[in-house]
Structures are given as structure tokens and as C-alpha cells.
Amino acid sequence: MKISTENLVSISEANQNFSRVARLVDEKGTAIILKNNVPCYILVAYNLLRQNTVASDADVDAVASHILSKHIQAFEELAK
């Protein structure tokens, strides 16, 4: 993940001015919250997170087919 200096926010600023951090996430998609000047937390727009984490049915089918073909003997034994 690439981190832009424009998305860095101190934890004290996030605590005191969360609405500003929320606007930053609305504009940039993410905000990195620093604790003791070290990246510690990430705030991600929900719609961006959902776009990047939900697998399509085709992806799930492909993975299931791969697992089934790799372990077909075990599945056949379990089916008995």
C-alpha cells in the first residue's frame, strides 16, 4: 500500500478534529493515523473497502473448483 504524506494525521488531531479526518477520507479514500509518529491505524472509506474485499461469484467458483480438484480423493472418501 502506498502512503501519501497528505493522508497522515496524528492521533491527537484525529481525536480532536475527527470531522476533518472524515473529510480527508471522503476526498482521498484513506487516512493513516500516526501514534508517536509511526503509522498505527488506517481509516478507510466503507465503499472503498467493500469494493476491494468482496469476491465475485466467479472468483469463489474458481477457488472452489481448484480446492475440489486438488483434494478430490479426500472428498470422495468423505462422501462414502
Image (spheres, rainbow, N blue to C red):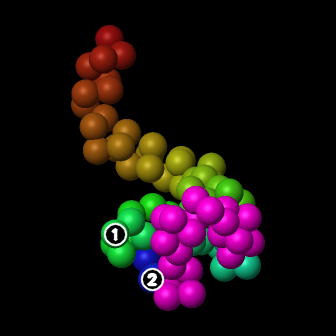
Residue found at x 62% / y 62%:
16
User: Does the segment drawn in magenta span residue 60?
Assistant: no
Give the tally of numbered discs. Answer: 2
Amino acid under label 1? Asn
Q: Is residue 56 left or right of residue 40?
A: right
Q: Is residue 13 left or right of residue 1?
A: right
Q: Is residue 49 above or below residue 38?
A: above
Q: Is residue 50 above or below residue 17?
A: above
What percent of the width, then of the height, locates residue 32?
A: 50, 71
What percent of the width, then of the height, locates residue 75?
A: 32, 26
In the foreground, 78 or 48: 48
Could you tell me if residue 19 is visible in this image? yes
The residue identified by callout 2 is 2
What percent of the width, then of the height, locates residue 19?
A: 73, 64
Residue found at x 36% / y 75%:
37
From the image, give the main secondary structure of the stretch colored magenta.
Answer: helix
Residue found at x 49% / y 65%:
11
SS category of the residue bearing label 1: loop
Q: Which residues are magenta?
A: 4-24
What percent of the width, then of the height, locates residue 80?
A: 32, 11
The residue identified by callout 1 is 36
Quarter of the image for residue 7 reads bottom right
Amino acid under label 2? Lys
Marks 2 and 1, how far apart at CA: 20 Å
Q: Earlier in the sequence, mark 2 or mark 1?
A: 2
Mark nearest the camera among 2 and 1 is: 1
